Amino acid sequence: MTWTVAPDAFDSPDAALLRRDYYDEVASRYWGRPATAEEVDEGLTGDGADRLAPPTGQFVVGRFEGKPAACAGLLVVDTDIAELTRVFVRPEYRGTGGGGLLLAATENAARAFGVRTIRLDTRTDLVEARGLYAKHGYRKVPAFHRRPYAEHWFAKEL
């Protein structure tokens, strides 16, 4: 049972499907009901994913036994800071090490961009995500923005 994680275009077929599944899950959890296809489409429209490509960022896809199973994005904010975004592991692959590999891949991409700090925000209901970040050295920090849905902020020095 093996994982591979590699850069991929944010709009490749695998990446687009993973981004859709990510948004479906976070929206459904937030609303406490399954998100509709229209709501997912609306959430993905103009979501800024096009910035997750060099030179402004990177998108990575994790494959488990060759099947697309996870994704993460890195957005360069300035010369020293990048934000981690759209971290997602399909439920059937959670607990198999993919999340840690996604973080390692985005951290390596950040280093290649010359970034020294990665930061992120998440919500209270995304318990698995908060656990993943803490396990991999991300520490809670004061809020660095006031965007909707952000309830917890983390950062890691590289």
Image: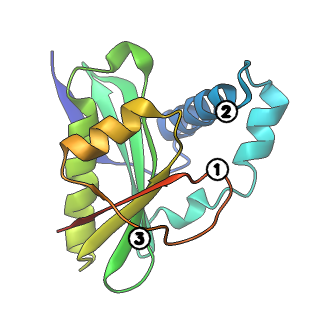
Task: Specify whether residue 70 is in view.
Answer: no
Query: As rendered, which of 73 and 33 lies closer to the eye?
Result: 33
Q: Is residue 7 above or below residue 99?
A: below
Q: In the rendered image, which residue does mark 3 sit on?
A: 54
Q: In the rendered image, which residue does mark 1 sit on?
A: 149
**Is 18 left or right of 48, judged from the image as shown?**
left
Quadrant where the C terminus is found in the figure: bottom left
Q: Distance between the residues labelled 2 and 1?
A: 9 Å
Query: As rendered, which of 3 and 79 lies closer to the eye?
Result: 79
Question: How dense is the environment of label 2, judged by Cα within 10 Å: few (below 14), some, or many (20 and up)?
Answer: some
The location of residue 30, given as percent across then percent down, is 67, 32
**Lower position in the chain sequence, tag 2 or tag 1:** 2
Q: Distance between the residues labelled 2 and 3?
A: 31 Å
Tag 2–tag 1 contact (CB < 8 Å): yes
Q: In the rendered image, which residue does mark 2 sit on?
A: 30
Q: In this view, does 93 lie above or below 75?
A: above
Identity of the residue drawn at 25% across and 31% down? 98
**Is 153 left or right of 63, judged from the image as shown?**
right
Identity of the residue drawn at 49% across and 67% down? 143
